[in-house]
Image: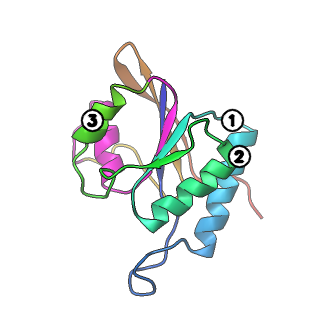
Amino acid sequence: MRLYLVQHAKALSKEVDPERPLTSAGWKETKSMALFISEYIKLIVTKIYHSKATRSIDTAEILEEYLAPANGIEQLEFLNPNDPIEPFLNKLKTIHNNVMIVGHLPYLNKLSNFLLDLPPETESVKFCNSGLISLEKTEEKWTLSWKISPEDLLTD
């Protein structure tokens, strides 16, 4: 089983728009990433989970368009930046297929650190907007498989 963690795309500041939709760069980077992971990595997920924030929803919808997860996308109430990770860890026990989370920092950092058995407050895995981190579960142990960011792609 693989768990893919995606930090939402670049979004407007609260001062510009309190809803924080994606910037044009955020849309472009996420579409480039989605195209790359669907066409070249052939990434398959059964579901994409996202938080209730506009920037997370927008990012998840772009990824859904390219990845076409069999069970679509779903908003979870406990994926917000400062939420505890325990509710998702409980849900994870019932998941047996590859899934993706589109979320926020520090949440994604806390979750990855816990799964990888790393100190909770360290930035052990470097997240970036629209970047994707692949964790793999083997025999009750999670490992970091790979990561990719928009900067890793050759773009015009």
Answer with mark 2 or mark 1, whichever residue precedes in sequence: 2
Name which quarter of the figure residue 37 lies in: top right
Q: What stretch is highlighted in magenta?
A: 96-121
Amino acid tagged 2: Phe
Q: Name the residue under label 1.
A: 41
For residue 114, the mark is 3
As measured in the structure, the alpha-carbon distance from the residue carrying label 2 to the one carrying label 1 is 7 Å
* Neighbourhood count class around disc 2 (C-alpha, 10 Å): few under 14, some 14–19, many 20 upward: some
Mark 3: secondary structure = helix
For residue 118, the mark is none
Answer with mark 3 or mark 1, whichever residue precedes in sequence: 1
Query: How does the figure colour the protein chain or chains?
Result: rainbow
Q: Nearer the viewer, residue 133 or 93?
A: 93
Q: Which of 148 and 13 is in front in this view?
A: 13
Placement of 20 over or under 91, stated as above or below = below
Residue 114 falls within the magenta-colored stretch: yes
Q: Where is residue 141 in the image (x, y as percent from the top left)?
A: 35, 20
Residue at the spot 22% in from the left edge and 42% down from the top edge: 120
Residue at the spot 74% in from the left edge and 60% down from the top edge: 155
Q: Quadrant of the C terminus?
A: bottom right
Placement of 5 over or under 139, stated as above or below = below
Q: Mark 2 points at which residue?
A: 36
Mark 2: secondary structure = helix
Residue 75 falls within the magenta-colored stretch: no
